[in-house]
Amino acid sequence: MQVNVFDTPQAAAKSLAAEVAELIRSRAAQGRPAVLGLATGATPLPFYAELIRMHREEGLSFAHVVTFNLDEYCGLPREHRESYWYFMHHNLFDHIDIKPENVNLPSGTLNADEIPAHCAAYEQKIKDHGCIDIQILGIGRTGHIGFNEPGSDDTTITRQVHLDDLTRSDAAPAFGGKDNVPASAITMGVATIMGARRVALMAWGAKKAPIVKKAVEGPVTADVAASYLQKHPNAAFYLDKAAAAELA
Ligand code: F6R
């Protein structure tokens, strides 16, 4: 696994965005879409800001880009401020020329009995696009990628999951209290993520340093879903110095 350490999150995000821009441009030149797997949360914000800057200042076009987001909270309508639909539009899609029909996120407003078929269709739609060219990830303090909480092994695909207590505590400030954080979400599985041609995980700050160490240097285990990336043929971590501080 590649581990790239940068002085700042901005420098790391800029390097990753340049790689993604190159992919988008080379695919567009071939008349083929680039398929991006995207993440939400605080971590990818500088990466999205850099993509928007490249769109505005360098003419980077997303007209041939297809996106699949990792996850969505169950029970949140699109217009909810904490929905990942809202997040992605507010922080990226509303500022670039992506076609609305090329944007894919799991739905947050399904009845329980509709969820399995929705998850199967989401997984199939990714396959119909060949595969994800590059999957962007953050990492939770439980070691989750997407919402693959401890116990998620590398056979898991898109499905409904219960959120770990620590994950709900971390989300509590945004929701005005832990009781308001949804109890479950729909997430791509570890196998879905491992199916991407390239995987790029970003992590910033000292709070992430212990779990980054486990993911990079610990055993490959379902207790830390991100540890499976050690087995991916083309995975890279993009870290700032603080997040990399505990690595040997
Ligand atoms: C987001 C996601 C999560 C986050 C992780 C880190 O779509 O799937 O795995 O990447 O919880 O969140 P932040 O970046 O807010 O620390």
Image (cartoon, rainbow, N blue to C red):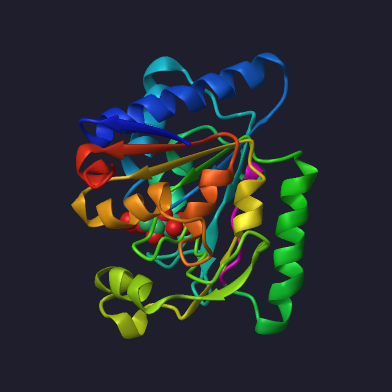
Q: From the top left corner, tell me how far across and down residue 48 is, in percent.
A: 39, 38
Report the span colored magenta. Answer: 102-108
Q: From the top left corner, tell me how far across and down residue 166 is, in percent.
A: 33, 74
Q: Magenta span has 53?
A: no
**Count of labels shown?**
0
In terms of depth relative to the viewer, which is nearer, 123 or 210? 210
Q: Horizontally, is 227 left or right of 50 in the view?
A: right
| Residue at 37%, 71% in the rendered image | 167
Q: Quadrant of the C terminus?
A: top left
Q: Quadrant of ligand 1?
A: bottom left
Q: Quadrant of residue 51?
A: top left
Q: Quadrant of residue 8?
A: top left
Q: Is residue 139 visible?
A: yes
In terms of depth relative to the viewer, which is nearer, 83 or 206? 206
Q: Horizontally, is 176 left or right of 129 in the view?
A: left
Q: Relative to residue 184, is residue 189 depicted above or below?
A: above
| Residue at 65%, 42% in the rendered image | 102
Q: From the top left corner, tell me how far across and down residue 136 is, in percent.
A: 49, 42
